[in-house]
C-alpha cells in the first residue's frame, strides 16, 4: 500500500512534525510506503509532487486545520483524522486505510 499524508496543527509547530514522524515510523514498521507533507509554521515542507499523489492508494489528512491545496486529492480515497489520532493511534489509521481500500 502506498500512502501520502498531510499533517497540520493550529500552531504549526510541534504536533505537525511529531505526527509526521509517528506516521512515517509506523508505516515503515508495517511495510507501508509513505511520504508525509507538513504544513506548519515554516510553510509547506516535503511537498507532495503530482506523481506522489497519483501513485498513492490512500491520502491521510491528519489535520486540525484546513490545509492548503487540498484540491490535489479530489479523485483520491482520503482518510481524515485529527492530529491526536496520528500521535496516539497510528496503527489504527493504517488499518482504516486498508479498510478504505477494501471497499473499492
Image (cartoon, rainbow, N blue to C red):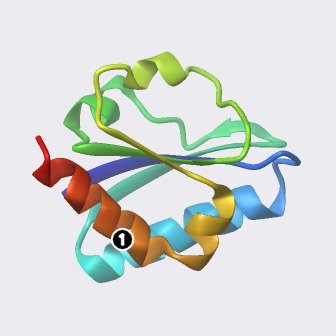
Vertical position of residue 45 compared to residue 67: above or below: below
Quarter of the image with the C terminus is top left
Q: Residue 78 sits in which quadrant? A: top left
Give how far across and how far down residue 75 sits, in percent.
Answer: 29, 21
Count of picture labels: 1
Element under disc 1: helix
Quadrant of image for the N terminus = bottom left
- Residue 45 horizontal/vertical position (percent): 63, 41
Name which residue lies at 58% across and 61% down: 20
Furthest-bottom residue in view? 29
Furthest residue in direction right, as rendered: 11
Residue 44 lies left or right of residue 58; in this view the side is right
- Residue at 41% x, 52% y is 35
Pick the residue in front: 59 or 43: 59
Q: Is residue 64 left or right of residue 33?
A: right
| 37 over 76 or under it: above or below | below
* Residue beneath disc 1: 27
Identity of the residue drawn at 71% across and 56% down: 16
User: Badge 1 local density, few (<14 within 10 Å), some, or many (20+)?
Assistant: many
Residue placed at 57% from the left, 66% from the top?
86
The image shows residue 5 at horizontal and vertical percentages of 46, 48
At which x and y percent is residue 87?
62, 72
Amino acid at each position: 500500500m502506498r500512502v501520502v499524508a498531510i499533517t497540520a496543527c493550529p500552531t504549526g509547530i510541534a504536533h505537525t512534525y511529531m505526527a509526521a514522524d509517528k506516521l512515517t515510523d509506523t508505516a515503515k514498521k508495517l511495510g507501508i510506503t509513505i511520504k508525509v507533507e507538513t504544513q506548519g509554521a515554516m510553510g509547506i515542507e516535503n511537498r507532495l509532487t503530482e506523481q506522489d499523489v497519483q501513485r498513492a492508494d490512500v491520502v491521510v489528512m491528519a489535520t486540525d486545520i484546513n490545509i492548503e491545496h487540498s484540491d490535489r486529492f479530489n479523485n483520491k480515497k482520503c482518510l481524515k483524522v485529527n492530529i491526536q489520532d496520528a500521535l496516539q493511534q497510528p496503527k489504527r489509521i493504517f488499518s482504516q486505510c486498508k479498510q478504505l481500500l477494501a471497499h473499492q
